Image: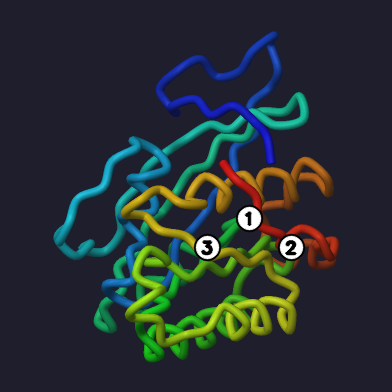
Amino acid sequence: MSGARTNGSGPPAQGGVKVQNVKLVLLGDQGVGKSSIALRFVRGEFTENSEATVGAAFLTQVVNISQQSIKFDIWDTAGQERYHSLAPMYYRGAQAAVVVYDITSQKSFTRAVSWIKELKQQANSQIVILLTGNKADRAADHRKVSKDEGQRLAEENNLIFTECSAKTGMSVGEIFMSIAQTMARHGVPSPEKDAGKSVKLEKDSGKKGCC
């Protein structure tokens, strides 16, 4: 997949192209690496043993793809159960969601299944959802969730799928570029809840690439 990235604080676009804002929410169990994914994508940074998010954190990043510019307004939500009641405030009206699990934790994968079900029932019906298994750098010795399990869950729910490593940066860019590519192909979903039919992803949209 191709497309140049620019920091959200930089030029809005090249050649006067209008920037389209996309609200994106990161969901997943505590400790799966949601904040690490966001920081790796936006700032190219990784911090070992970072503090747990309280409530939610907000970051922005612009991607340029197919003569379009998409500005992701990224809401990184807290994974602790006590903050679960706040989640609808962040995913309501979101046009994209990244559901994260830890490939070394079966519990986090089960939680991801619940998040997907909740999004399907309560979020914008047009929302583009990507499922990602983080900590792929630990796959050789600590994997508990097979790649086939993640792929199957994604296919059953018409989601984009990838595995990534926020620590090494592997495929982190692909997460956001895959969503941008889907929106470039199908159009940016309306932010209103239940505003039309769900975006149908093409069969090859979940294929791995390198960003």
Image quadrant holding the N terminus, namely top right
Quickly name the residue at label 1.
Answer: 95
Q: How far is the residue under mark 2 from the one under mark 1?
A: 7 Å
Please tell me in which quadrant of the rendered image residue 195 appears.
Answer: bottom right
User: Mark 3 — residue?
Assistant: 98
Residue drawn at (54%, 49%) of the image:
23
Residue kind at label 1, given as amino acid type: Gln
Question: Mark 2, residues whose alpha carbon is within 10 Å: few (<14), some, or many (≥20)?
Answer: many
User: Would you say 96 lies left or right of 182 here?
Assistant: left
Report the side of 133 relative to 19 (left or right).
left
Measure how far apart labels 1 and 3 are at the Cα level: 11 Å
Picture residue at 51% right of the left edge, 87% below the top? 114
Nearer the camera: disc 3 or disc 2: 3
Amino acid type, residue under disc 2 in the picture = Gln
Q: Quadrant of the rendered structure where residue 159 is?
A: bottom right
Residue 103, x across and y down, in percent: 42, 77
Q: Which residue is mark 2?
A: 126
Q: Is residue 77 shown above or below 83?
A: above
Q: Residues within 10 Å of mark 3 (few under 14, many from 20)?
A: many
On the image, the x and y values in percent for residue 35 come to 31, 56
**Foreground of the two, 38 or 102:** 102
Identify whether 140 is placed above or below 33. Answer: below
